[in-house]
Image (cartoon, grey):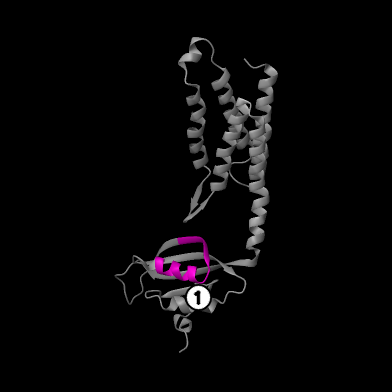
Amino acid sequence: MLSYWEIALRLGLAVLLGGAVGFERESQNLPAGFRTHILVCVGAALIMLVSAHGFAGPLAEATDRSRIAASVVTGIGFLGAGTILRQRGNIRGLTTAASIWVVSGIGLAVGIGFYFPALLATGLVLLSLLVLGRLDRVLLSSYRTKWLIMRIPDRAGLMREIAGIFTDLKLSIRKIEFSQASSPPANPAQAYLEIEIMLVVPLNFEQNRLFQRLSFVEGINRLCWQGEEVPLERAQPSL
């Protein structure tokens, strides 16, 4: 059996490591923050302590200790799923769900006494959340985000054609939202979709190139760029 001091050390270290990751999430005003990560890490460490040292005598031989620790990996998925939000086609919270999952692994490592892997993993997680997050924003500083709104018929293969245009022009989709749109009087039987797309575009991007390419796509009857309507006849290339 472990001494009381060793148990206190492991649970206390779980508080510190889980709290370090949780503090970063809390600073971003995310739903799972400081307390949630501490509870997950301490709970995982406690379960590992019970799994490794909580059984003695005949009970220890009849118990599959690995199954107790493995239940953390399964159970933490439900908690992580609760942090993922879906709003009008946008998905948020995946990073927080991943941080909860990795914090449970840190707690298991602390509970079994693997201090160096737990400390190293915590450092790498903080590096990913803090440093790499800022680096990602710096790399994207040479790009801008623009909103494009289109009304298109609900027809198979049309979005694939439009996405191909974005790829050719080196535009990437940051967000996309779909909603039902009223059909134009000229074609009332056809179902239409209103699509709002946030595009990441380079600073030197010429938007008329996009308008010209989209003008060749059959079915688009509304085009709006940054809140301003773009007449489709204006988007036609000059001969």
Q: Residue furthest left?
A: 189
Which residue is painted at 67% across and 33% down in the image?
116
Which of the image's four quarters has the C terminus?
Answer: bottom left
* Of 60 and 36, the residue lying toward us: 60
Q: Position of residue 38 (x, y in %)?
A: 63, 34
Instruction: Give the magenta part as a residue range.
Output: 160-177
Q: Is residue 234 above or below residue 193?
A: below
Query: Does the segment drawn in magenta span residue 163?
Result: yes
Q: Quadrant of residue 189?
A: bottom left
180 left or right of 94 in image: left
Closer-to-camera residue (194/219)? 219
Determine whether the residue tagged by mark 1 lies in a helix, strand or loop. Answer: helix
* Residue under the image location 47 percent in, 34 percent down: 74
Left or right, 35 with respect to 175, comes to: right
Residue 60: percent from left, percent from top: 50, 14
Q: Residue at x 48, y 14 (%)?
A: 61
Q: Which amino acid does label 1 sit on?
A: Leu
